[in-house]
Amino acid sequence: MSEDELRPPPIRPANWLPGIAAPAAEDIVSCVSCGLCLPHCPTFRLTGRETASPRGRIAAMRAVQEGQATVDATFRTMMDECLACRACETACPSGVPFGRMIEAARAQVEQVRPIRARGPRALGLKYVLPRPWAVYAAGTGLGLAQALRLDRLAPAAARVVSPRISLRQLARPLPQAMGTGPTAALLCGCVMDVAFRDVQRDTMRAVAGSGYRAVRFRPGGCCGALAMHYGYPEAARRMARERIAECEDAEVIVVNSAGCSNHMKTWGHLLADEPRWAARAEAAAARVRDLLEMPLVTRVRDLGTIACHDACHHVNGQALGPDLRRIVSSTGATPVEIPGGGHCCGAAGLYSVLEPELSAQLRRDKAEAISATGASSVAVANPGCAIQIAAGLREIASPIRVVHPAQLIR
């Protein structure tokens, strides 16, 4: 062999866009492409495409990292089709941190997205969600449109997955504090505070009834999870700093939404490179408790059979599946397993709006699986899942009710 043939190929510089978060090289190489994640990936199960699998998406990230590909439209499509359900993480024997990899990859692709698509996302994620008054105004507008039946003018896909807004609930102010004992700061959030105000009120009652002084964040707002999931890490960091400053006097931080609690537990990692905030973020993250983790006092009632839906950010992000069943059982109800219970319902934050066809298939599969249980209700502890599953049950004309665990405790 000649000297040129023996020489190793030149190392190409990574093709990530400069100055933007990108998947870490050490995370990328941790994947050995074994394929054990494939049957657990919702998009791979639906399409059978390697490009719609965790292994395929990591291979695309590796190609960009090694200078063999660029962050282009094809790469963007591969990342957009991912639900970020993290079922692959649960299945992976190598502990590949796919969740943070897909978030960083989406920060990259957001920069090459056409402005007509990026503009509305940036408006909502960076400017509306962080402001409670703006979220409230948007919710009121949606509630009025639904009351006047003007929502029929919206595209069918958006109409199906829109939360049902109760103007009566919106008009009822939520208490700022309730109960006595150690302070438990309750996240107001964005969607929960507008579309699930009855759940917010029941959460306060449940926490206060368990020996805490339940206090709502002041002024409250989005935790930053959606911004982080969809390519706006700086907006997520800003919201994290705001929420941390609001709850530093609390002994515990209680969250009744799976996606929010999972994200808030990563605040330490998110702000690790900010000297003024790193220690505060780590301390706040250590005090975050999903409602399912709280030592709640319940009372036994005749609630029949309740199917248990595992939100992805509960079962894959926090391993809280047994806690949901514990709460259901403590109320006197009989918990029922859903066939394929760990499968994603297809909500995944904004996924049901951004990828309506794939989301609709997953929604129907989940609704039919729940209906097959014959349960009277299904317990769901995440707003996106609740909206998606309720829509799916309506589509198949199932009478099963969607309830939050906080509503079982009241």
Image (cartoon, grey):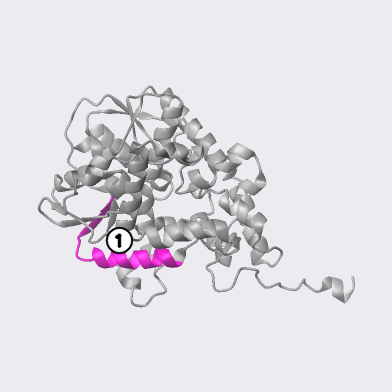
| 324 relative to 105, above or below | above
**Quadrant where the C terminus lies?**
top left
- Amino acid type at mark 1: Ala
Residue drawn at (46%, 46%) of the image:
348
In the displayed structure image, the side of residue 227 where residue 239 appears, left or right: left
Residue drawn at (65%, 48%) of the image:
51
Residue drawn at (30%, 70%) of the image:
280
* Magenta stretch, residue numbers: 234-255
| 89 relative to 20, above or below | above
In the picture of the structure, the residue carrying the numbered disc 1 is: 286
In the displayed structure image, the side of residue 128 where residue 91 appears, left or right: right
Residue drawn at (20%, 60%) of the image:
251
How many labels sit on residues?
1
254 in magenta: yes
Q: Whole-percent x and y of residue 66?
A: 67, 66
Q: Secondary structure at mark 1?
A: helix
Most foreground residue, 329 or 311: 311
As drawn, the residue found furthest toward the left would be: 180
Q: Whole-percent x and y of residue 395?
A: 46, 28
**Quadrant where the N terminus lies?**
bottom right
As drawn, the residue found furthest toward the right would be: 2
Most foreground residue, 183 or 40: 183
Local crowd size for mark 1, using a 10 Å CA cut-off: few (<14), some (14–19), many (≥20): some
In the displayed structure image, the side of residue 335 where residue 6 appears, left or right: right
The answer to which image quadrant residue 16 occupies is: bottom right
97 in magenta: no
Question: Does residue 32 show up?
Answer: no
Question: Does residue 175 show up?
Answer: yes
Q: Whole-percent x and y of residue 40?
A: 54, 41
The answer to which image quadrant residue 165 occupies is: top left
Q: Whole-percent x and y of residue 400?
A: 36, 26
